[in-house]
């Protein structure tokens, strides 16, 4: 019940089409293990993971329409919690769960991608490069106007994520050096919502998973390094984290097949296509 | 015959007792889980400090203030509109138009608030950003008119019902004395129906306090104490939704039980207060 109320705005229930396409029967070997399977797989948690989850689910369902996969958001905190309580089969987290969480819930981790977290602004914003200090001052509220960092004379609209977000955690730790985030910052609940908010507000600054950066928002170079797939991969851009999928105990059945698929060559290709860095 | 009657009676009684107990059970549940915090003498801290988990502050004062401000502001917008609408529907408009209006209002009650919020996110937020001239356009002032739209149908239906219940003896007498329609409304119907009006306001206010989607999507959710209605703010309900994802054992999670308790007590005591006052005044007359 509680979960439902929370998930309404962000659930991207992948009621993915039951397209019966014969062409998929010649799909790669990576999908072949799904051939005789049927049932439902529930996935929830980190919102950075969603593009990859959706694409993987689409390929699996196209290959075998008897498998149902539902994908919900909710954030990393929710992913850890729901996987731990057995409410979902796979919980996603954009941060490594704490040792305490792993122990309490008997969580098994699979890291299947590396992802950067970058500050983003509206494409029309002239300010597309900041130093770490400037970024920290903007987030702490010390710098409140774009003209203090070379932009127009207009108040900066700060956007942040809720405290249970893994994206926020890594951004706060590595880009803001654990500095304060002003209480005046607006709070949104997913990477997608952050992108929508910043894309719609010419005076906004926010942060999203690098995999989510597209034409609608412009990444801000941090100390001269723009967060892109290449700079994250090479390690030049340091604000990065692993993307994890968690199960309670060793994964079994569909959950195991799904996780195996994620780290298979096909799965890792999806990871790369969606703008993340494969681990294998 | 007698037996089946008592059977259905018992069924209804059970249903009534059950739903009544559920309400009480929710309160007990919130109280039980909020108790550790209340016992440790942190209640005043929680009610009057700000929210900053990093610094060990779990206060809900900014949210409490935002909730009350937002609900009052939307009531301020919604009440005149609603009462005007119900005048039109009960007395002023031609009969056929009244039916159409009433049907539309009934449809409005069923529209989920997330739909209103979604539309407002794309139309009202950019508009407010330009009008206010600073900030993201997400503010109490943005959420208030949308929330007003959400609570209006409930209030209108309540008002219309209570206006219609006014005895025709009074209204016919007023008409016989040559009252205009406006005079009839102001001097006959309204004085007779005011307990109903207050009940409608009460329900509307309760709904405004309890709504989550509108404020979550439009008010901006910042945890600072709002200094003006143009500031971004977080209501109690949005706060609960945002903090739910925390681990059960965390202080953040525990503190939202107090949040829920506050919301519960606030709404319940408002209801009680209004009920008592209506009962008192209608007895006095």
Image (tube, rainbow, N blue to C red):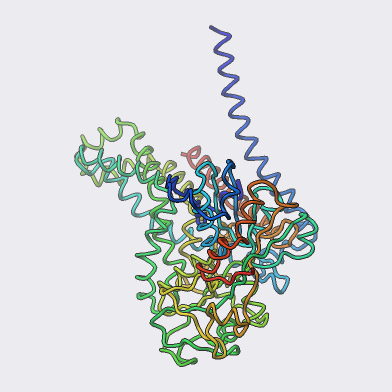
Percent x, y of residue A4: 57, 49
Q: Count every numbered label the image shows and give the total.
A: 0
Q: Nearer the viewer, residue A56 or A205?
A: A56
Res A96 visible: yes
* In the displayed structure image, the side of residue A222 where residue B150 appears, left or right: left
* In the displayed structure image, the side of residue B1 where residue B138 appears, left or right: left
- Which residue is at 73% across, 62% downward? B251
Percent x, y of residue A71: 55, 53
Q: Nearer the viewer, residue B272 or A274?
A: A274
* In the displayed structure image, the side of residue B170 where residue A193 appears, left or right: right
Instruction: Establish if B214 lies above or below A129.
Output: above
Q: Nearer the viewer, residue A276 or A200?
A: A276
Percent x, y of residue A103: 80, 58
- Which residue is at 52% across, 45% downward? A64
Name the image quarter holding the C terminus of chain A: bottom right
Name the image quarter holding the N terminus of chain A: top right
* In the displayed structure image, the side of residue A218 where residue A255 appears, left or right: right
- The answer to which image quadrant residue B4 occupies is top right
Percent x, y of residue B89: 28, 42
Instruction: Establish if A263 lies above or below B229.
Output: above
Res B240 visible: no
- Which residue is at 39% across, 68% downward? B125
Q: Nearer the viewer, residue B248 or B69?
A: B248
């Amino acid at each position: 019940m509680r979960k439902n109320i929370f998930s309404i705005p962000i659930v991207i229930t992948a009621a993915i089409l039951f397209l019966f396409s014969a062409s998929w029967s010649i799909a790669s070997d990576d999908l072949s293990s799904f051939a005789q399977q049927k049932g439902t797989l529930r996935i929830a948690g980190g919102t950075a993971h969603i593009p990859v989850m959706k694409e993987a689910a689409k390929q699996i369902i196209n290959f075998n329409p008897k498998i149902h996969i539902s994908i919900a958001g909710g954030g990393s905190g929710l992913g850890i919690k729901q996987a731990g309580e057995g409410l979902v089969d796979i919980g996603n987290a954009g941060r490594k769960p704490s040792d305490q969480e792993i122990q309490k819930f008997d969580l098994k981790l699979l890291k299947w991608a590396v992802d950067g977290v970058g500050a983003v602004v509206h494409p029309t914003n002239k300010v597309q490069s900041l130093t770490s200090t400037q970024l920290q001052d903007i987030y702490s509220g010390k710098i409140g106007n774009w003209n203090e960092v070379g932009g127009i004379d207009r108040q900066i609209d700060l956007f942040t994520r809720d405290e249970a977000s893994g994206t926020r955690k890594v951004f706060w730790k590595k880009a803001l050096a654990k500095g304060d985030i002003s209480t005046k910052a607006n709070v949104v609940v997913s990477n997608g919502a952050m992108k929508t908010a910043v894309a719609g507000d010419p005076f906004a600054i926010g942060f999203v998973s690098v995999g989510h950066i597209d034409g609608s928002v412009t990444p801000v170079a941090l100390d001269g390094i723009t967060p892109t797939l290449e700079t994250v991969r090479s390690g030049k851009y340091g604000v990065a984290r692993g993307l994890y999928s968690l199960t309670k105990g060793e994964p079994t059945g569909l959950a195991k097949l799904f996780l195996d698929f994620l780290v298979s060559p096909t799965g890792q290709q999806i990871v790369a296509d969606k703008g993340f860095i494969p681990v294998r | 015959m007698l037996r089946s009657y008592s059977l259905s009676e018992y069924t209804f009684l059970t249903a009534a007792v059950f739903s009544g107990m559920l309400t009480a059970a929710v309160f007990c549940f919130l109280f039980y889980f909020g108790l550790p915090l209340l016992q440790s003498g942190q209640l005043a801290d929680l009610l009057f400090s700000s929210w900053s988990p990093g610094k060990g502050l779990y206060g809900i004062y900014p949210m409490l203030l935002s909730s009350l401000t937002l609900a009052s502001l939307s009531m301020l917008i919604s009440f005149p509109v609603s009462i005007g609408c119900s005048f039109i529907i009960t007395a002023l408009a031609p009969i056929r138009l009244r039916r159409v209006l009433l049907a539309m209002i009934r449809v409005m009650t069923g529209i989920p608030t997330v739909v209103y919020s979604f539309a407002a996110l794309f139309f009202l937020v950019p508009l407010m950003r330009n009008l206010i001239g600073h900030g993201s356009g997400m503010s109490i002032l943005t959420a208030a008119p949308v929330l007003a739209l959400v609570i209006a149908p409930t209030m209108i239906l309540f008002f219309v019902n209570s206006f219609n219940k006014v005895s025709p003896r009074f209204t016919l007498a007023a008409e016989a004395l040559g009252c205009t329609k406006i005079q009839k409304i102001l001097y006959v119907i309204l004085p007779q129906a005011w307990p109903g009006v207050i009940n409608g306001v009460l329900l509307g206010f309760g709904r405004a306090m309890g709504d989550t989607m509108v404020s979550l999507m439009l008010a901006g959710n910042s945890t600072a104490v709002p200094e003006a209605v143009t500031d971004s703010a977080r209501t109690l309900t949005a706060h609960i939704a945002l903090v739910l994802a925390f681990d059960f054992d965390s202080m953040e999670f525990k503190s939202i039980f107090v949040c829920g308790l506050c919301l519960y007590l606030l709404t319940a005591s408002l209801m009680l207060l209004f009920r008592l006052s209506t009962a008192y005044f209608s007895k006095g007359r």
